[in-house]
Image (cartoon, rainbow, N blue to C red):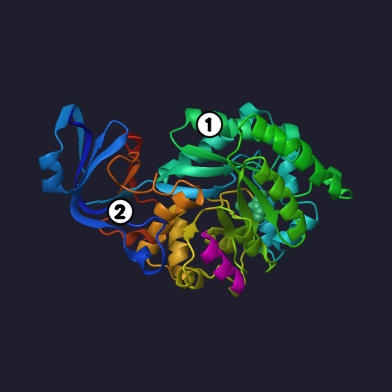
Amino acid sequence: MVKKATLLIRNASQVVTMQGPVPRLGPDLNDIGLIENGAVAVAGDEILAVGPCDEVEGKAPLAEGCTVIDVKGRVVTPGLIDPHTHPVFARTREQEFEMRTLGKSYMEIAQAGGGIRNSVRALRETPASKLKEGTVRRLDRLLGHGVTTIEAKSGYGLSTESELKMLEVIQDLNLMHAIDLVPTFLGAHEIPDEYQVKRENYIELLINEMIPAVTKDNLAEFSDIFCEEGVYTNEESRRIQQAAKDAGLKLKFHADELASTGGAGLAAEMGAVSADHIVYVSDDDIKALARSGTVAVLLPGTTFSLRGKQYAPARKLIEAGAVVSLSTDCNPGSSYTESLPFVISLAALQMRLTAAEAIAATTVNAACAIDRGGKIGQLVSGLPADIVIWDMEDYRELPYHYAVNLVSKVIKNGKVVVGK
Ligand code: NIG
Ligand code: FE
């Protein structure tokens, strides 16, 4: 039987389809599969047809009661994907933000007992119901900025009980919220207060108790670690991540964020799906990432908010043939934002990505960063109907018109969830 359209989006000045190679590499990053004067037909929760208006309207029969949205010359893109977030937390940390504006560094604040350990103390005493309330507000804001799928990390519990509490919150919210959440276990985000003088015991707890508990209940798809000077060494990271891999988790690394330690190289060597931050990645490790296909997830919002002097070497990574993606790193410490469009502006202004490259990095390549390459992040017949209608005529306005929300409507799985 011929499928009929239940939703028709017509009269788009531009449809950014992202049809084409997955992942997008090198010069192909500028190919966003643009269709002018386009339309998208949706059947139920999936894309039925994408193309010039007259073609789509000619070949997709409309179901009875089909919703027709005339976007009147606006831009249509796939739903954005945010592949690195820490959205579950108990309290914000504006006092630390102020300390940074007055000149203290992120690491100085962390070493004085603030930072991640500050969030851990608060999260442990907060019930799951309260955590859910706060997280829903952040998911609503992400969705409102055009994000339809996120990766979401634990990492503010740092005990078996509290890490499981966080992952269960993520699991529950995935079922009840329009945004899809991909769960990551980040028990190795820091060394908690009570293990500061016996860090080896915490590593054993991670390996022998926490990872098995997480995998037993299928609460995470990825394992991540803060591999950084002053947090986990490369050798510790290798041990913990090997245990996670042996337990069936895919790997991600926070690497080379504040100093060059070879974390990205370790991620590539261990076959990680992504290496994130990588501001200080070495030239050799850029080559290693390109060879392994490990996605470089760049987080310019973090550099911006930490008042960093240097942004990740996006152009070098692209030229080397690495898979480049972008993300908010939404968290209460180093990057408190739910605006992936603002991150796209920063990527353009501070890392010299074109609008096309930055959109590819937050759709098709962001899907690769969560191991869903070719499954989401493109407007292709048969894929989920995750679509954003933007209040702009030309997609290049997305980085250019910065720090305002230009989302007009968001469609998730074929349903209008924002801008009804
Ligand atoms: O990605 N770098 C480590 N983790 C987070 C910060 C988390 C926090 O400060 O609460 C990041 O920047
Ligand atoms: Fe992070």
Q: Residue at x 77, y 60 (%)?
A: 230
Residue 154, image x, y percentages: 64, 41
- 206 sits left or right of 296 in the view: right
Is residue 189 visible in this depiction of the protein? Answer: no
- 379 sits left or right of 341 in the view: left
Which residue is denoted by mark 2 in the rendering? 19
Q: Is-magenta flag for residue 278?
A: no
Q: Disc 2 and disc 1: Cα gap in Å?
A: 30 Å
- 107 sits left or right of 68 in the view: right
Is residue 77 visible in this depiction of the protein? Answer: yes
In-front residue for pair 98/343: 343
Q: Is residue 190 above or below residue 163?
A: below
Q: Quadrant of residue 178?
A: top left
- Tag 2 secondary structure: loop
Disc 2 marks a residue whose amino acid type is Gln
Which residue is denoted by mark 1 in the rendering? 173
In-front residue for pair 47/394: 47
Residue 235, image x, y percentages: 76, 58
Disc 1 marks a residue whose amino acid type is Leu
Residue 289, image x, y percentages: 55, 64
Q: Are marks 2 and 1 in contact (CB under 8 Å)?
A: no
Q: Is-magenta flag for residue 290?
A: yes
Q: Residue at x 51, y 38 (%)?
A: 181
Residue 15, image x, y percentages: 25, 52
- Tag 1 secondary structure: helix
